[in-house]
Image: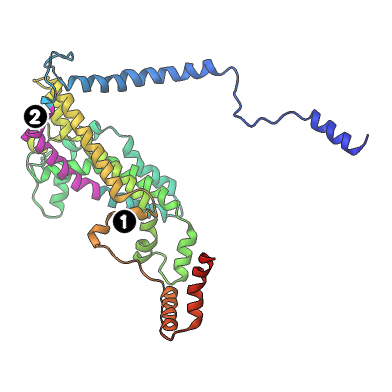
């Protein structure tokens, strides 16, 4: 058999190559069997309550989850002049000002320390992450009855006595003491989770960058190395942590409800809306409207934070967004461009024929 005929026979015997996606037969029933419970739970416990809550926000519904009287946007207008709701937003702002930067600083510091440990790194990661699995209610009970109970036998008051300070009995009834209780319990519960996020970001930084900086004369363990190399490389992680912390601050409920109760001065928006909808009033229409208003504020805050900070490590658009604060600046001219401009200017001033020919050549070519 000749070579061309053998090649033709091999091509005929070879199976045809499929370029499209391969479909696995017999798995359609298994897919719906596993997916249907999730879909039913999503519709029953998430989508339908959202739709029904949006419907109730347009009606008057007191003591019932069924709409009784259509009132339009009156429930939403009421929150614009509700001093109690505005006070709850101010409480959230105070809480966010305390908890967000403190959590970011502590979690980043712990991540740097754990990342620098050659041994027992897994142990310390588990130890710091373990409080995340604890219930907020259980932690609040420990904080209220053991640490900050206001008695001289309380752990914190005993520590104050060791350093020569008087015991404090108004930990949960006077400002600013209640902020210490609220911030510390939230900090203990969530700092381990964000430490893992920063630790993942630190371990993703290429070691070649630190080696190159060391060659240039930077101290490997110094603050200058941390400021010039580590922090810029953690920009994406920091933006994500900041967004998550803001959302978690908006959703703060357990520690406020279990530690300070319905105190107007320490009542965040969720506690206020909870008392409207499930308190003595049971105004589900107004509570649903407040929930939608709070959701809109959270979405706007998240979009604003993303627009200002961004998530890209080399986001030039973020720099352009702040251009109006610095004023319009001219583009920096390269040294090579400066030298070329000076040469062209000098050549033009001496009446060089070469530059004239270079300038005139394109015009001649266009005319031709």
**On the rendered structure, is 126 left or right of 329?**
right
Residue 300 position within the rendered picture, expressed as x and y whole percent measured from the top left: 24, 39
Check disc 2 and report the residue beneath it.
78
Q: Secondary structure at mark 2?
A: helix
Q: Is residue 134 visible?
A: yes
Q: Secondary structure at mark 1?
A: helix
Residue 345 position within the rendered picture, expressed as x and y whole percent measured from the top left: 41, 80
Q: What secondary structure is the stretch in magenta mostly built from?
A: helix
The image shows residue 359, relative to residue 293, as above or below, that is: below
Pointer 2: residues within 10 angstroms few (<14), some, or many (20+)? Answer: some
> Which part of the image, by quadrant, shows the C terminus?
bottom right
Q: Which residues are magenta?
A: 76-101
Tag of residue 320:
1
Mark 1 or mark 2: whose residue is earlier in sequence: 2
Q: Which residue is at 44% across, 84% downward? A: 351
The foreground one among 188 and 146 is 188
Q: Which residue is at 49% across, 69% downward? A: 363
The foreground one among 49 and 111 is 49
- Return the residue found at the far right: 1
The foreground one among 344 and 115 is 344
């Amino acid at each position: 058999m000749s070579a061309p005929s053998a090649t033709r026979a091999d091509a005929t015997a070879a199976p045809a190559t499929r370029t499209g996606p391969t479909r696995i037969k017999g798995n359609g029933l298994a897919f719906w069997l596993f997916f249907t419970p999730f879909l039913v739970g999503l519709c029953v416990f998430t989508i339908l309550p959202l739709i029904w809550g949006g419907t109730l926000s347009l009606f008057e519904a007191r003591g019932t989850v069924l709409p009784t009287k259509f009132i339009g946007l009156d429930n939403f207008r009421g929150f614009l002049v509700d001093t109690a709701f505005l006070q709850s937003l101010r409480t959230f702002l105070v809480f966010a000002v305390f908890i967000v930067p403190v959590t970011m600083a502590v979690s980043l510091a712990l991540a740097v320390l754990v990342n620098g440990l050659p041994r027992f790194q897994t142990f310390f990661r588990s130890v710091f992450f373990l409080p995340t699995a604890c219930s907020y209610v259980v932690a609040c009970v420990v904080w209220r009855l053991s640490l900050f109970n206001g008695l001289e036998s309380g752990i914190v008051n005993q520590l104050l006595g060791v350093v020569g300070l008087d015991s404090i009995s108004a930990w949960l009834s006077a400002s600013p003491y209640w902020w210490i209780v609220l911030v510390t319990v939230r900090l203990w519960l969530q700092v381990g989770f964000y430490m893992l996020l920063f630790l993942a970001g630190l371990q993703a930084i290429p070691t070649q960058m630190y080696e190159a900086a060391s060659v240039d004369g930077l101290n490997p363990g110094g603050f200058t190395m941390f400021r010039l190399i580590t922090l810029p490389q953690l920009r994406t992680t920091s933006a994500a942590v900041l967004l998550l912390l803001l959302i978690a601050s908006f959703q703060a409920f357990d520690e406020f409800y279990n530690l300070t109760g319905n105190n107007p001065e320490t009542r965040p928006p969720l506690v206020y809306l909870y008392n409207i909808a499930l308190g003595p009033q049971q105004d589900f229409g107004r509570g649903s409207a407040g929930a939608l208003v709070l959701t809109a504020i959270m979405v706007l805050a998240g979009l604003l934070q993303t627009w200002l900070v961004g998530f890209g490590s080399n986001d030039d658009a973020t720099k352009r967004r702040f251009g109006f604060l610095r004023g319009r600046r001219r583009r920096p001219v390269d040294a090579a461009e400066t030298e070329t401009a000076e040469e062209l200017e000098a050549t033009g001033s001496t009446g060089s024929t070469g530059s004239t020919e270079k300038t005139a050549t394109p015009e001649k070519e266009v005319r031709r």
